[in-house]
Amino acid sequence: MPSMRAIWFIEADGDAGIRCRSQAPIGVDSIGAPSKALSPTLLWFVTALLLAVTAPGAAVAGHAERDLPGKLLIGYWHNWAGWPVTLRLTEIPASYDVVVVAFATPTVPAGATMRFAPDPGIYPTGGEFVADVQALQAQGKKVLISIGGGADPITVDDPTDAASFVTSMSGILDQYGFDGVDVDLEGGSLALDPGDDDFRSPTSPRIVYFIEALSTLMALYPGHLLSAAPETAQVQGGYQAYSGIWGAYLPVIHALRERWSFIHVQHYNTGSMFGRDGNIYEPATADFHAAMAEMLLAGFTVDVWDRAIPFPPLRQDQVAIGLPAGPQAGGGYTPPDLVHQALDYLIRGIPFGGRYELANPDGYPAFRGLMTWSINWDSYYGYEFSRSHRTYLDGLTISVPEEDDPDASSELAELRAFPNPARRDIAVRYRLRGDAEVECELLDLRGRSVRGRICQSRSAGEHVIRLEVADLPSGIYSLRVTVAGRSRVGRIAVIR
């Protein structure tokens, strides 16, 4: 059963000030379900596995996603020594929030039984690798295991393959203590058979059974993260054609759409692509990044010149962009200033003078962030990628410090506010360790309250307060959040 989270809003009430209202709890971190009933073989296997597995990693884990910041920097780590740079996990800079280990691969070419072992050239023993994973986790980072990669296709063609995939991946997750799974299936791992023409009800066995296997695996680990790094042809390519590899990821994304933590399509090693507006955009441009990202943020038409089936948008916080860390890391390297133009447009609605016009001119403030191939390449280039983009992403949110010294007994465990600058509203997200009274205020530079009202006691967990700022003049404001008598203050810019 999905966890429930109450969302609270603060809204303007004309001259009367601010009033609080609650919205019925909404389900989050939902567990994806297979697109059709499990086959008898797989259902028997799942039942047996649920009864048999008692390792701590198989228990219902804490929801890892709740511990992540609103804007993420995600990077792949090479599990091989040598070119371009050999890195241990503990050498990864603090700027990365999620580390994706590349890769778990099939035991035989194009198989379904998975294996993973740390490269002995980096980690002579598995225990050293596990210790470094735990060290990153102690820093608040999440460490995922990626499956596949461009050189190692995975094929799950029948119930036996699905059972082998779930068993082997469960063993990898438990042995190494990963926080989740990243799906990087390329080549022929996912392909549409002739006659499979609707992503909502796939018929290609290779896709149907992979959906079953992945859904089953993630049901065993409901608190784990799930991400994916498809190629543009496999997702946005479904606009122009839905066959073969074109659009082949769409049924997988759709079947587990409530379960994905984030999806970062590879905006590299690609040719020009159609946007949702029917125009063609060239890679390594701000237009390309904005157009490709908004296809998932706003939805798009699949097989536009034939069946024309709408693909519904994902949540804003599920969408990120994949970029190469440097010119040699992948085709389509984009300098940071152009990336930031695209992100300013996507997130803040600030135009940069390009051809692409957002379907939502106000942007998508909850857009999740950036992924890179790879951390090793970032190291090779002197960490230019992570330095520049971490600074940019941090500028979109404020992590509000306490006015006085931090106190371990404080009920406020985490506080974030975004977007910053803001145009229409500010989402103030906070997490409480226990029940507490919460007050949120927005003040102008003269200290006058322009938005504020105590929202009575809140229970432990995550909550959101939304402050409307569309009627406020441009300028700098102070955001003050008081929890159980302790205040934190940060700066928010409002722009027109």
Image (spheres, rainbow, N blue to C red):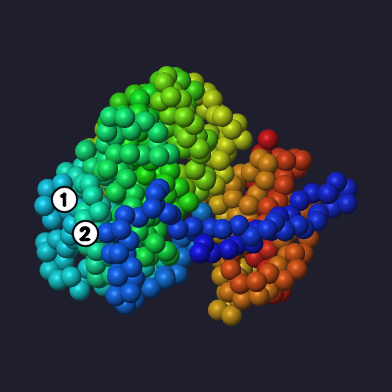
Q: Amino acid at mark 2?
A: Ser
The residue that label 2 is drawn on is 164
Number of callouts in the render?
2
Q: Closer to the camera, 186 or 385? A: 186
Q: Residue 226's quadrant in the figure?
A: bottom left
Q: Secondary structure at mark 2?
A: helix
Q: Is residue 469 left or right of residue 392?
A: right
Q: Is residue 26 left or right of residue 177?
A: right
Q: Is residue 153 left or right of residue 235?
A: left
Q: Residue 340, how many percent across, how many down?
A: 46, 37
Is residue 61 depicted above or below 251 in this figure? Answer: below
Q: Residue 470's quadrant in the figure?
A: top right
Q: Is residue 100 visible?
A: no
Find the distance from the CA under tag 1 to the CA under tag 2.
9 Å
Q: Dot 2, crowdedness within 10 Å: few (<14), some or many (≥20)?
A: some
Q: Secondary structure at mark 1?
A: loop
The residue that label 1 is drawn on is 111
Q: Dot 1, crowdedness within 10 Å: few (<14), some or many (≥20)?
A: some
